[in-house]
Structures are given as structure tokens and as C-alpha cells.
Image: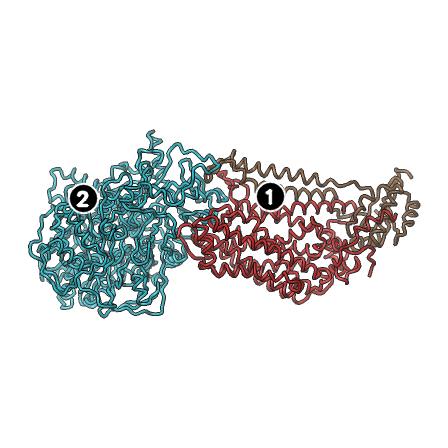
Amino acid sequence: MSEAAKPSEKQYIPPPSELGSGQTSYTSITEKISSVVLTRSTPLVWFISLLVGFTLLQALLIAVAYLFYEGTGIWGLNIPIGWGFAIINFVWWIGIGHAGTLISAVLLLFRQKWRTSINRSAEAMTIFAVMCAAMFPLIHTGRPWLAAYWLLPYPNSMDIWPQFRSPLIWDVFAVSTYFSVSLVFWTLGMIPDFASFRDRAKNRITQIIFGVLAMGWRGSAIHWERYEMASLLLAGLATPLVLSVHSVVSLDFAVSIIPGWHTTIFPPYFVAGAIFAGFAMVLTLMIPVRRIYGLQDFITDRHLENMAKVMLVSGLIVGYGYFMEQFMAWYSASVFEGYMMQNRMHGPYGSYYWALILCNILVPQLLWIKSCRTSTIWLFVVSMFINVGMWLERFIIVVTSLHRDFMPSSWDMYHPTIWDWATYIGTIGLFLFLFVLFIRGLPLIAIHEIRTLLPIGGKKS
Amino acid sequence: MDEKITRKSLQVKDIRTRLSQNGGRAYWRSLDELANTDEFQEMVQREFPDQASEMKDPVSRRNFLKLMGASLAFGGLTGCTIQPPEKIVPFVRAPENLIPGKPLYFASAMSLGGVATGILVESHMGRPTHIEGNPEHPASQGGVNALIQASILDLYDPDRAQVVKNAGMISTWDAFTQALGKNLTTQQFKKGKGLRILTETLTSPTLGHQLKTLLEKFPAARWHQYEPANRDNVRAGSILAFGEAANTYYDFSKADVILSLDADFTFSGAGNTRYARDFAARRRVAEATESMNRLYAVESTPSATGSIADHRLALNSGELEALTLALAEKLGVALKSNPESTPYNDHSGWLDPLVRDLKKHSGSSLVIAGDYQPPAIHALVHAINQNLGNVGKTVHYTEPLEVESVDQNQSLTELVHDMRAGQVDMLIIVGGNPIFNAPMDLDFASALRKVEFRAHMGLYENETSELCHWHLPESHYLETWGDARAYDGTVSIVQPLIQPLYGTKSPYDLLGTLIGQGGKPVLDILRAYWLDQNLALDFEKFWQQSLHDGLLSQSALPRKDLRVDSTLQVSPELGKNLEEEELELILRPDATIWDGRYVNNGWLQETPNPITKLTWDNAALISPDTAERLGLKNEQVVKLDYAGQTLSVPVWLVPGQASDVVALHLGYGQNHSGRVGNGTGFNAYALRNSSAQWGGAGLKLNATFDYHSLASTQDHHSMEGRHLVRHGDLEQFAKHPTFAQEEGHNFPEDLTLYSGFEYNGNAWGMTIDLNACIGCNACSVACQSENNIPIVGKDEVLNGREMSWIRIDRYYTDLDEPEIFHQPVPCQQCENAPCELVCPVTATSHSAEGLNDMVYNRCVGTRYCSNNCPYKVRRFNFLQYADRDSESLKLQNNPDVTVRYRGVMEKCTYCVQRINSARIESKKSGEPIRDGQIKTACEQACPTEAIAFGDINDSKGRVGRLKASPLNYEILNELNTRPRTSYLARIKNPNPEIVES
Amino acid sequence: MNKETAPPFFGLMAEFEAPEDLLSAAKRAYEAGYRKLDAYSPLPIHGLGAAIGFPKTNLGYVTFICGLLGAISGYGLQYWVHVIDYPLNIAGRPLHSGPSFIPVAFEMTILFAAFGTFLGLLIANRLPTPYHPVFNAPNFERASQDRFFLCIEAEDPQFDSAETRRFLEGLNPQEVSQVEH
């Protein structure tokens, strides 16, 4: 027997400090995490954040209602600047979404066990971010009520189909696929935890709700076998997917001929940017959450540090992207490219460009310092800078490229209106609202995965 | 109850009289209308006064739309109007009988400042929708300008005056006739001593005849003429030179060297469309290096004509006069010397070369002075032309065009004087708005109040009609018969295209009533007059022919041989230089709304000024260096003080403006014009007085701290080293014909993997000759009228959302002595259209004939196509711009073109509707489409024939030939968009002597 | 024991405290010749499936076939639309613009594969299963929390309530209980 047990034991030797010292047994883990939903009384902060999210959400609803009533003209758009906040926010949100998939899928493939305590909430973030993002391509059209179904592969009465050469159609496919696959992956991951909740439920209603969600999961060894395989496969699929999605988003620009858009470095540089932005957002959310719910044992400083390292690396890749844009503008010797770069740096929007450099290149360099990587305050500040910086990056790409392109006669400026802001802030509200609900209603840490981290022979505490 | 009874009784009586009155077919929807009771009139009119309050605020487009909704009642009126009962003769190109969906074309004429231009009016089922030039008319030869194009919109303007008003209350024509009758009878005894008629410039022989009859009937009565954009100086000039008033017209087709002294002859003034055409015809070197004319332009503020000159000199009036004097002396014009005039300082060093050039081409040269130059300049120019032997060759004299040529300024002054003296019992104002635009010092208003019986006839209720007892709604020229003389005196017939939309009458009717021809149809009056002239044996035939052609053949005024004999006496003031730091004010009619009469015309309001690119406003134009000296910024409001009158107005910097000159355009700043025009711009008339109609030195300018945002359609004026407008001079072209094509990067044909598509049938293409384009906007207004392009209002222009499908880009080379380039940019119809590739819903795709088609109904409005369009020619309906509410405006829409909905992208389609109708024709007849059979709206309108459209596969065709020219180039073709629209590089013909110096 | 008289209950359930106990127990039960048995745990335990003789899952094939299906239908749709059903000259590009068709085809591949995998998993696991006898086992709610169970089903040919119970007790479990239907 012992020989048989030996190999299995090796598998149970966990890498050091995956969990805080406080977590020694399956029971305590289950106890601790499920209590957030099932037993513990909801902290005031939760209600406050819910209220904030809900209020901002109203701004979104009003803005969109007025938009549909009056038309795209309520935004600061014009000819030549046909895209503004809507597309900026779209790319920004999609970027944020990517960290979730990256953490849950890519790190799973790389057997990075430290991911387990953050992947659930990261995936949730993905789902909500993509929801916010996916809204924009629809509402930014002049006639959303038609775009809603003309963008789908379905012929109209004249047998006109979508135009599959258009990156916007690629978007539709990429984003919807990304959303549904993330959703599936997320749900799959939660089934065993639903079962735990079902079995710990204190009252009939919660029991029924989680019972239904758990779909009768009973932890059968055979089920676990298939389950593991399925998550591995999905991770395998999600990884190329996440890379493709932001590449496709970047093609919205790269396929066009506008100086500042038409560049081949976009796909990798957008993906790196997405990871950069995504991890920043995970930190922005996780640092407060683990504080509020005292989950330091699960989301340890080591996790934060690892994320900081990922941010540092992806940040450097983004920096390389910026440099490459500069270089190509010079190397192409094209009057248009050259002017575009000059205009970015010294044109009317120059200050934005330098702010971007500050947020995305300079500030993240702090992460070279270990004390920064390990201090939650510093990490939070840096990640905030990056959130802003990445938004600026999209602003620079979308607006400064458009506002001065080929024909000087049609150059113009872009002035966002109150409705642009309302819509943008509104989506932040939507995101916050959903995320707060998630924390309260669903297992925000993958319990069954955490269990696998326990050293062998964990006894009931 | 009893109210009902009264109505009933009313009807029966009125209807009888009505029916007895109007002969011919009459239409009415209800006995009420026929009876034309006040109740009915009120019902119709109610909307208007109610809205009046709201109309004060500026035209934000949305507000504009809301207000438009108010005019549904007009729809009821216009709904059933059809062509007038009289038979009018369609133009040959159209079938004799009305076929639904098939437009008819009728010859008519539109006159501005009394001078007529022949037009063809496109009529869909009795609705005039579009105006084109009349190829058979000497003043047009097929071209029209923006003002003529846009005049059709006035016809449908819901703000037009629609009913007779008495003291602001709705009244009827009958009531007016009765009141008039009473007063006339009293005048009978006084031989009309107290009767005055005030008209605008009047060249209509028939109307003139009516007036003369009136004056015979009332010998003591007086007829005055006044309009602000008058040609008094021209008249005075010819009297100074010849001792008699004469009309001068020019033959640019024979002119090799032209000197324009502040004359914007290609763009405005009598005969401008014809002049532009002849002038441009002599510059067309695209196909072979022929001789080319040379234009020297001297002007104070840049004009369309100046912008295409080979040599352009910006001088203030003083310097310009000095130059003219110096020139006259050098050309041996006998002058009473005037010591005070400062000798011309020729720092530009082009006086002598110019003189040599003129002398070299004596007989084929031409010197032309602007209408607003002082009389002396005109006199000098007459003398100069005479010495150069141009008279009879490039310059012709005739009797004045006006029925009675008067000094209008003086004429008005006399009228005011008489009114003050209380000698005027009844004044009838036919057209115009003297209260608004009479010289300020006359204080017309107070004088007018002294008159007992005041009637004003006009298209709009304006300041003047408010001060008159009676306002009489005037019929639009497309609603009435008439005649007028063209720039060379050719009598042009005005045919009505539609029965009056409202209860309006024409001046002919009014005069008819005055001379007891009341109720006589205008056509009869017209025919009767021309019958008496016995111009032809078979009058019927002659008349039919005339209607068909739109003019009386051979009716041009006979040329007169006038000579300047006496030595000219010019005032010592002439050529007086400005003091140090002294400013000069120059007043000019506006490029789009003229003297203010088109202020309520949305198309013209939104048509950018050819040079400043300003819409919806006028501004004090100053040169950059003057602005620098005075420390002024663009849009900064300044207080102008001229001869004791002041005006606050924002400044606008204009490269190419003469230093120390402040140019101001007339006509803006009205408050009684209607929903579109109210509150736009600043009233320059406030600075105008009878002694200096066109301004002068001694202007004081005080900067304020206010700013007023001006809506310009172009914010960036340098080409940033991009090869958009390519240009060279004649010498360079002769030496190296393909210089234009070698500029910039060209996309190597073999650099693509794709085989591309074949276009074997018709392949439509366009060439635009930058050498001919004067930036006059005729094309863009024509496009607007042809393609139902909405206006968006000032706010939206400020937002950068103007809708023009063909815009005219204007570039400067530098700030102080700029070359000015115009470049019309319609959709380039790229064969590899970047817009098509990125449309997610296939709303824009390529036709087999190479058109970049736009399917409005399929468009969801992602705006990606516009982002990806390197030429930025796509326009987006950010809001509901198209007016879906005003019934009367709907009538103007071209039924062959979709009215676009909010959220839809739109763009130039090479007038695909015209292409299709031609294709249908050719399919029916089985003959291929001829070269030149299809004319796009812009091509049709272009007075200089700069735009050519046709099949590029047809190498013999006009476009085929032009595309083969070495000057032909495509913009941004390094992007491999393969545009179908190409440009012909601009060639200048500078005087080598000047270039060297 | 004879098949005709089906046992009145589902099987016998042994409860363990630690994963390794369950693992070894499962191994021994299998060695003892039991075949219709299943183990229940709150976390995946590597080798447990193998221990109770569960062959490797072939979910991978499902994923692959679905993916292939997605790729073909994705590319096929675009080809059919642009080349066969409604050919249009778009921006002068060839009707069959291969490169432009790849992104959509790719996304369709992922979409089909992912859904195939998920649905395949549910079907193979017969989920949702609202009712299952093992839930009747005492203390079984802890199978999703901190306890480990081994169940030998009554349908096992080698099953004999007394014999099997003795065998299970030999694996020193916390407890052995009978699972009702």
C-alpha cells in the first residue's frame, strides 16, 4: 500500500506559502470562504460600494436612453473623428477582461498553483468587463436597433450578409466567443463549489438555489477525472482565444490605412497592453476585497508580488511597443507617419501622450523594487496609474490618429461631451455593481482548488 | 351660432365675386379658402405669430427642426398647387407631355441687381426642384453661380410672406385694392404729386413700361430706385468719362492680358457666370500647351477672382488708386494733374512690366475696375482701355440696362428729403428693405413715418413692411411671368414653374392695379408689351421660340461707340495714402447672402465664403500683420467706429488681405428675416452712410475682451508638404509636361498581389481642372439641391459636422503674400475603396461601373468607413438633419434621391440617379450612352467647366482625353486607392519680367 | 448471491477523513475484485479514478471534432456568402479573400470546441442529476467539504452485504453505513 501511496504523496507536497498559516484544514477553508456568502453578516462597505455602483449605473441608463432617442450627435464626434469614447472604452474594458482568462487558463497550463486563489474573481472580472465592453460597439452605431442583428451572420430581406472582411465583424465573433467561453469556463469552475454551498446551506432557499446550480454534483471520482480533463481542455482553448481577441481588436485599427493605426506591431502590443491593464485591475479589486473580508490567507502577499512581476514584464513589452511606433514612424520616411508621431508628441493632444508615458512606462518601473511589490499601498497606487494610463493609450490611438490624418483641410478637434463621460463612468458603475453582487452571492475563491493546496493529511481543526 | 350665419352669408357673396374675377382654371379646397375670409386666413396663418417668439434664438439645428414642424399648415396649401394655367413651353431636352418620374426642364431667368441670367429649371410633376444654366443664354451658357442655384430654396421657405397684412393684421388683396383706390383718386386731382414708387434696380422692359404708363397717368408722381448693392460708381464713372451713363460689358474670350482692379468679375456682379466661363476657357492648357491668358489682380481683400490670378497684389484703396493713376499716366491718359495724390510706390516692382505687357497686347488686353471702386477709377479705366485699343474688341459699351438709369443713392436721398418735407402722401415700395439697408445717415425710418399711405411688397415681411401700413406678399420669380435684361442687354423671359404657393402677387400685378389693369394676367401684360414692339412678323411663332429659348433672340442692346475725349478731372482725394496706423473700412456685398436678401436661405448661410470658409456669420476681415500690430486674435470682438457709427464684430484673420484694411460684408445681423437668418452675423449697414457707400479711410477700431465663435468649415490652411494641389507655371509645363505626375510618391502598379476587377462596360470617372476652379461653390450648392443634402446649422458646423458632399478645400502657401489654391473634393470613387473594406454590413460596395455605391438603407452607422477614408469625403447624419416635417420644404426634394435618416453615412455618388436614368434611356433606345450625355450636378453648374465627368474607357471622350493629359494626377495615390476622380494640376502664367525681379 | 433478487438498498458507504486513506482504500477494494464502486471527494484526487478502474476519459476527441466542425462551418459560411451566394466587389479585393476569413473561422473553432467540451462533460457525467441515492448516506453532505467516501454498490456481482461490510470495516474508515435507494 505504502508504495502505492508514496507517488501520490509527492503530488500532495505543495509549493511553499500558497496559503497563509491560518489555513490548515479542508474544513476551515470551506468554512472561511463559504461564510462570506452563507453566514457572515455583510459589512457596511459592501452596501456602500453596491450603492455607488448602482448610482453610477443609473447614469449609464440615462445616457444610453438619451443616446437612442437623440442620436450619436450627443457625443463629441465629428468628421474626421468618427470614433471617440465609445471605442476607447471598448478597447479599455476588453483589455481589462483579459487578465482573468490569462490567470485562469494560461497559468493553469503552466501549473502555476498560486493562481488558484485569485482565478475565480479574476474570471468574474473578465465576464463583467467584457459585458461593459461588448455594449459599446453596439450603442456607438448610428442605428443600434438595426446593428443589433445586421452584425450577426443572418441575411436581410435583400439577402445581404455581413461583410466578413471587416474587422468589426471579426470583433463581433471574437468578443461574443470570448464572452461565452469565459462564461462556460467560469461556470464549470464553480460547480463543485456550488455543491459545497448546497451542502452547507443554512436555509431551504439557498439550498435550493445552489442545489440547482450544482446540478447534483457529488464529487464522484469518475466525474472528477472528466472534470479535470475538461478544465484542462478549456484552458487550452481559452489561451489562444484570449490572445486572438485582443489581436482582433487591434486589427480594428491595424487593418485601416490611417497613420497611427496602420501598423503591424498592434496585435502583440495590444495583447501585452491587455495583460498589463488586466493585472492592474485585478490588483485594484483584490487589494481592497482581501482586506475587507480578511482573505489575506488566501490572497497572500506572494500572489500580489507575482502579479506585480507580470505587470512589470507586460509593461516593458508595452513600452517596447511605444518605442517601435516611434521608430517605424521615422524609419518609414512617410510624411504622414512622421507627422502623426510629431502630432502625438507635440500636437494639441501632446500632454495626453506624455501623461501616458508617465503612467505606463515610468511609474511601473517602481515595481523593480521589492518593497514596492510587497506593499499593498504602493501596488494599489501603481495599478491605479496603469488603469488611467491604459485608458489614455487608447485615447491617443483613437483620437490623435484620426483628428489629423491625410487631408489637412478636414482636420478637427475632439471635445467629449457630458454624455461621453456619463456613458464611460456609467459602465464603471455597471462593473462595480456586478462585481459587488458577485462577491456577496458566489464563491469568490475556488474552494475545491484551494483544497488541493493543503499539505497531506490535513485534519479537522 | 350667429357667427356661423355671418360666415355663410359671406361665402356666397365672396365666392361669386371670386369666380367672376379669376379667369382660367382656379383651384380651391374649401369655399372658405375661396371666400378667403379672415377666419380662413387666420387659420392658415396661426402658426406663424405663435412661433415668432421662439424664432429669436439662433438656429441650433434641433431647435430649427422643431420650429419647422410648425409649418404643416403650409403643406395643406401647397399640396395641390400645380403648374399655372397658362401654357408654358418645355425645353427641347424634355418630352412635351408630363410623365410621372420624368423631370421637365423649362427655360426661365433669375435676376440679381436687376441683371438676368438664363436658367433651366428642373420640374418634377410640377414641382421645381433644381436649377441649371441655360446653355442658349449668353449670360449663362450652361453655368450658374451659387446664388442662382440656391434661389430655388426661397420659393419653398416656410418663412416667406404669405398674406396681405394691414397694420400687422391679416387682410386681403381686395381690401388693399380698395384702400389703394381711395388714395389714388385723391392723387388723381394732384396729378400724383404725392405719389412715390420705390423699386430696386429695374431692367424689365415690361415693368418699366408699366411704370412709365403710371407716370403718364400721374405726371407729378416720382419713381425712385434703390438697392444697397448698386452700381452708382460704375454709372458715375461712365458719365465722368463719356458724359453719359452707359453699360459696359467685356469679352474675356478675346483677352490675353487682364488687369482687374478690385473686380471680382468671375464671381459676382453682372455677367459673372459668362465672364468666368470665357476667362477659364482661355486658361485650359490641360490638353496641349496653347497660349494662355494672364490675369493681374489688385485688390484690398482676397476674392475668388484674385485667388486665381497669375499676379496678385493686395493694396488698400489709396494705393490701388495711386497705382491706377500711375498706370493711366504711363499709358498716356490725359489727366488734370492732381499734386496732392501721393505718387504710387511700386515696391512690388510690377508696374512697368505690367504696362509693357498691356501695351504688347493692346487690342487683346482688358482692364476692368470693380463695381465698388470710385467713379474716377472707372473713368480712368475707360480711358486706359481706349488707349490700349480694347474698346470694341474686349470692351463693349451699350445703353444702360436699366429702364431708367439713376444714381440710386441720390434717388433715395431725394425720396427721403421729400418724405421729410411731407410732400409724399403715398409710397409704394416694391421689393427691397430700405429700413434695414438704406444708408444710416438718411434715417429712412423716421422719414417714412411721415407718409400717410405706405405699402411694401416683398418676399419676406421685414423691417420695412413692419413700418408700412400694408405688406403685400410678392411672388417668387419661379411663380410669376416676367422679363429682364442680361448683362449685354439680352431680354430674358421669366417663366413661372408653379402657381403661387400662397396668396402672393407679382410687381407686374401691383403695377397693373395702379394703372388700372387690375386682375389682368401677367402673361397677357407681357405678351401685349412685346407684341407692341413688333419684333417679328409672326409673333406667335417668335413668342413660342422665345419662351422655349428663355430669351428674345437678337435682343442684346446695340453696341455704342463711346470715346473719352476731354482730359479727365479726377478729385485730388484720389490716391491719397493712409496715415500712419490709420485703418480703412471696406464694405462689400456678401459672397453668399449678397446684400442680405438671402439671409434666410439655409443653403447659402451654410455655404462657406470662398476665401474665409466662414458660414452663418460675417466678420471683420483683417490681415495677419495688422492683427499682429493691433494685438488681435481670431474671433476676438472689436468695436468698429466709422463716421460716428459703431458696430461690434469679431475679427477673422485673412492671409492676402491688404494691411490696415478692415473688410466687412453686408447683409447679416437681421432680426426680421425668419428662422434661419435671424441673429446670424453682424449688421455692417450700421457703418454705411450715403457719402461713403463702400467705406473709406478713418476707421477706428477698439478691441474688447469678448470672443464670438465663428463657424469655419476649414481649420487648417497649410498643405503640410503633402502633394494635394500640384501646381507649376506655363514655362515649367512646357519644359517638363509631366512635372505634376512626378510629384509625390506614385503607387507602382506591380506592387499588388491581387489581379483586381475588370471594368469593361462604362467606367465612370471625373477630372477637376484646378486651373479653372475659382472656388465659387456653385458645385456644392448644386449638389445640395440635387441630392437633398440637409443643412445642419451653425452649432453643428462648429462641431465639424457639415454635410457638403463636394467641399472646396482652400490652401494658403504663406501668411503674408499667400498663393491661394482651391480644390473641390467630392468622393474620389476609389477602385480599391478603403471605406468598403471596413463596412461590417456591406452598406457600401463597388458597382460594375466602378462607382463606390452607398446603400443608405443598409447602413447602421459605425462611421468606420469615414475613419478609413483618406479623403474624408463621407458625411454622417449625427442627428436628424434632414427636415422631415416642413411640408413646403419637402416639395423641393429630388424624388430620385433618398432623404437620409439619422445615423446613416452619406456621400457623393457621381449623381448615380442621373447615370441610371441615362442608362435606362440607352437601354430603351439601344444606343450606348454618349459622351457628355450624363452631367453630374456639380459639372452642370460649374461656371468655369472645371469639372468633367464621363466614361474613362472612352479615350475619345472629354474625360478620357483629360485623363491622358500630362497634368492629370490623383491625390494620395501612394495609398493604392486608385481614385476615379483625378485632378489637373494648376498652371500659372506669370509675367517672366516680374518673376525675375 | 443471485441477480434475480435485487438488493433493497443501493450499496455500502465507507467514510474516510483524509484523501490518502480513500485512495488506498479504493485501491484495495479494486484489488479485492470489486468493480461497481465509486469514490466521492471534495477535491480531485490524482490516481483515484485509475484506482477504481476508470479508463482514461476521451473528452479530448469530442473537443477536437467540435473544433473541426467549427473551423469548417466558420470558413465555409464566409466562402459561401462572399463567393457563391452574393458575390460583390468589395474594395477591389478578390471574392475569396482567404486571409480576411481566418479570424472568424478561428473564433468559430474555439466556440464550437469549448461548447462541445462543456456539454460533453455534462452528458458524460449525466449532469444535472437532481437525485442520487448516495445523497442518502449519512454525513454525505461533507463529501463536498472535508470528508472522503468510498461506495461499493449492491449491484456488484461480488457484493454481499455482510461480506462487503466486513471488508470495508477492514479499511479502518470513520464509519461504514448502508446507502438506501
The colour applied to the residues of chain A in this rendering is red
From the viewer's perspective, is residue A285 above or below residue C101?
A: below
Residue type, mark 1 in image: Glu
Residue B902, position as x, y percentages in the image:
44, 51
Residue C10, position as x, y percentages in the image:
85, 45
The colour applied to the residues of chain C in this rendering is brown
Question: Which chain does the numbered disc 1 sit on?
Answer: C
Which residue in the protein does label 2 denote?
A: B254
Residue type, mark 2 in image: Lys
Q: CA distance from mark 1 to mark 2?
A: 71 Å
Relative to the observer, which residue lies in front, A167 or C136? A167
Relative to B155, B340 lies left or right: left
From the viewer's perspective, is residue B369 above or below residue B968?
A: below
Asked if badges 1 and 2 are on one and the same chain, I answer no
Q: Quick one: which residue is furthest to the front in this view?
A: B996
Q: Quick one: which residue is furthest to the left in this view?
A: B566
For the colour cyan, the matching chain is: B
Q: Residue placed at 90% from the left, 38% from the top?
A: C2
Q: Residue placed at 58% from the left, 59% from the top?
A: A387
Residue A264, position as x, y percentages in the image:
53, 47
The quadrant the C terminus of chain A occupies is bottom right
Query: Could you say whether the residue bearing mark 1 is in a helix, strand or loop?
Result: helix
Q: Is residue B424 visible?
A: no
Which residue in the protein does label 1 denote?
A: C107
Q: Residue placed at 62% from the left, 41% from the top?
A: C109
Look at the image and name its color scheme: by chain
Relative to B594, B331 lies left or right: left
Q: Residues within 10 Å of mark 1 (few under 14, many from 20)?
A: many
Q: Nearer the viewer, mark 1 or mark 2?
A: 2
